[in-house]
Each structure stands twice: as structure tokens, then as C-alpha cells.
Amino acid sequence: MSNHTSLGIGEFSSLTRISVRMLRHYDQHGLLAPAAVDPFTGRRSYTREQLGRAGDIRRLRDVGFGVAAIGALLAASGTPDFASAIRIRRAELLRELGETKDRLALLNHLFPEEGQAMPAITVTTATVPAATIVALRGTVPSYAEEGVLWARMMPLLGAADLRPLGPGGVIEHDGEYRERDVDESAWVPVAPGTVAPEPLEVISLPARETVVARVEGPYSLITEAHARIAEYALEHGLELAAGGPQSPLSQRNFNVYLSKGLPDGASAAANGPVTEVHMPLA
């Protein structure tokens, strides 16, 4: 570092790892103005004391905050609001990381490299026997976030001393694919005659004929399973039930999670989740 007090914009850029273009951009937005600007040459200069603020700006930029947010965060540095914003950003990045991993797994299953096996999705017809279930219905932010519903349901089952007889799943009530605000019921099978307190509901379901896709792999493959079921039904001349909220409960699409754990990734079978996706026949 040179011995003079002021630093030219190039030297300041090199020390802070912020490009000259971005230094000018930050100046325009009031984040980091040069200490002086020569009125004749327009030469910008900075001081060593500004290196700390520049470093703070670069760190916030590098973790994904925009210019407006950086200004607000610098003003709130050391306050609970600053700490809260960092926690929220950390949660956002973790969610993005999970979504990226899911997409990569889906890519590897749908478009495997040469020599790799195709996704383990098998489609057939099935007769689902009559059953008694205990269900909790609610609206979840998205299909991938149905763990919210299970997190509410499991303590209610425990408090009521209700023990599932086998693997459970979800019933879809919307009759259409929704990008958000999904109406679903989480359910588990129980013995006939079971009584459950509200908001739990005991439902007796008749035997049903379905087209079922068995998915051995990540839950992100469930969408592909729906497509495979539609293709299978078309190929075999089968008519699928409409399944919407106006139809009987027995005609709505449902999943059965055969592997241990819930579809929020809390736990899984040794070789990954195993899911049955059922679409009843009309």
C-alpha cells in the first residue's frame, strides 16, 4: 500500500475487491461516496478509513443483499433488526440450497448420464382396500411444504393416543395443480371404530380402483409420476376421476409414503423415499 493518505479509485478497488464500476454505482446510491473528487479532472479518491465500510458493503453484497437493503442494513448495524435480517437471509439461502439439490436430483433421474438407470417409477392399476383413516386438513404454502401439516398433526395424534396401523400420506382436495395455497389432508390408517378429537377427523373410505405410480426416489419425482399416470391411462383407455372438491373424497388423488419419515426430508429409507401416487378411476 502506498504511503500517501488518499487512495485513487483503482487502488481502492484493488484493496476492497470492488470494481471501479460498482464503486461509482455505490456512490450514486449514497452507499460509499469518495472522500474527494477533483473538480478539474474528476479524479476520485478515498481514504483508508473508508476501507472498513467498503468491506462491509462487499460482504453484504456477496451474500446476496441488494443496494437498497445494504444501505438499510449498514444503518441498522449492531441492532436486533440487523441480526434478524441476517437470520432471514441465512434461511433463504438454506432453502435455495435445498431447492437446488432437489432440482439436481430430479435432473439426474429424468435425464441420467449414459450407463445410469432411468428413474424408478412403475405404473399399474390397483385395488385399494377399504380403510379407516384419521386426517387433518389444512392449507399449506406449497406441495413441498406439506411437512407443516404433519408437524401439526403428529402431536395431536400423540395427545389422543392414536397409533397408526401403517404408512400414511396425503389427500389432495383442489382437483387442479396449484402453485401455492394447497388444500390437503395428512392422514394415517387406524382401526375401525376409532374416535378422534377435533380438528382431527375420522373417515371411512370405500375400496377404490386406481392407477398407481410407485416412485423410488426423491419427492420431486412425484410430479413426473402424475405425468406417467396420465400417459398410462391414455394408453390403456382408462378414465381418471376428476378429483376436485365437489367430487366424493374417495375420488380425490392421494399419496402413500411407504418409507419411514415424512416428505419434509426429516428421515428416509436407506435407499431414499418410496412413494405411491394414486389417481382413482372414474
Image (cartoon, rainbow, N blue to C red):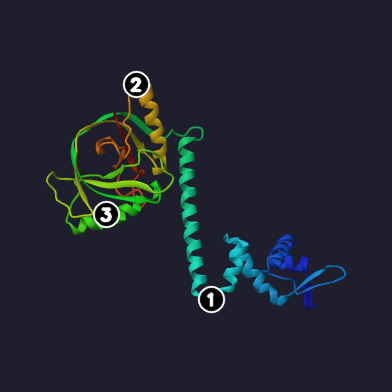
- Residue type marked 3: Met
- 187 relative position to 106: left or right: left
Question: Which is more toward the observer, 239 or 266?
Answer: 239
At 47% across and 60% down in the image, what residue appears? 91
Pointer 2 residue: 237
Q: Position of residue 118 (x, y in %)?
A: 44, 33
Q: Position of residue 97 (x, y in %)?
A: 49, 53
Q: Position of residue 131 (x, y in %)?
A: 18, 39
Question: Which is more toward the observer, 10 or 255?
Answer: 255
Pointer 3 residue: 153
Image quarter of residue 36:
bottom right
Pointer 1 residue: 78
At 69% across and 67% down in the image, what residue appears? 16
- Please, is residue 212 above or below residue 267 in the view? above
Q: Position of residue 77 (x, y in %)?
A: 56, 74
Q: Residues within 10 Å of mark 1 (few under 14, many from 20)?
A: few
Q: Residues within 10 Å of mark 2 (few under 14, many from 20)?
A: few
Q: Earlier in the sequence, mark 1 or mark 3?
A: 1
| Secondary structure category for the residue under label 2 | loop
Asked if disc 2 and disc 3 are in contact, CB closer than 8 Å, the reply is no
Q: CA distance from mark 1 to mark 2?
A: 66 Å
* Quarter the C terminus occupies: top left
- Residue type marked 2: Gly
- Please, is residue 14 above or below residue 100 in the view? below
